[in-house]
Amino acid sequence: MGTSLVISSTVHIYPQHLPFSAIKEAILGKKYELSLTFIGEKRAVSLNQAHRNKSYVPNVLSFPLTTTVGEIFICPAVAKNEATSFSLSTNGYVAYLFIHGCLHLKGHDHGDTMEKMERKYLKAFAIS
């Protein structure tokens, strides 16, 4: 059995010292296989257009491939621009987006329950 979290990047600047594995395990479990890829704005728009028929630059995209395998794409450039409006550092906001993506993979939709869970995980991992 390989690692259950694989992180890659097609951009030069992305946070590397966040507790991605611990967050993934807390939300999705040890056996869930997840790939996290940091991407630029062009690829983010292209994925959003292809898979969701949306033409804006997303901050995070999550795709469940099976019940135990999924992938998350985060665009650090968008995260950097949005972080202050969420009162988080850029790295803190990237961690928030990762939590958000994991919760979607777990089957949660936007709303009060998801927001409560996001706050719970931000607090649990001391993310600011």
Image (cartoon, helix red, strand yellow):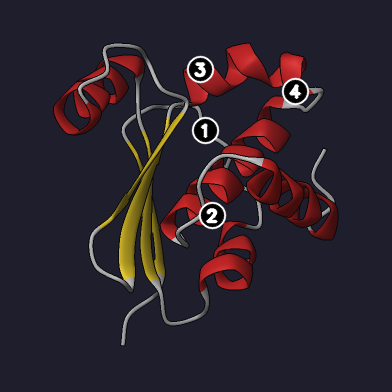
Determine the CA span between mark 1 and mark 2: 21 Å
User: What residue is shown with label 4?
Assistant: 86
Give the residue at the far left of this rendering.
50
Quarter holding the N terminus is bottom left
Q: Quadrant of residue 5?
A: bottom left
Q: Local crowd at mark 4 within 10 Å, few (<14), some, or many (≥20)? A: few
The one nearer the camera, 46 or 10, is 46
Determine the CA span between mark 4 and mark 1: 18 Å
User: What residue is shown with label 1?
Assistant: 14
Q: Position of residue 28 (x, y in %)?
A: 51, 70
Determine the CA span between mark 2 and mark 4: 18 Å
Residue located at (47% from left, 25% from top): 59
Numbered tag placed on residue 37 in the rendering: none
User: What residue is shown with label 2?
Assistant: 103
The one nearer the camera, 44 or 3, is 44
Side of 27 relative to 37 (left or right): right
Residue type of the residue flagged with mark 4: Phe
Label 4 residue SS: helix
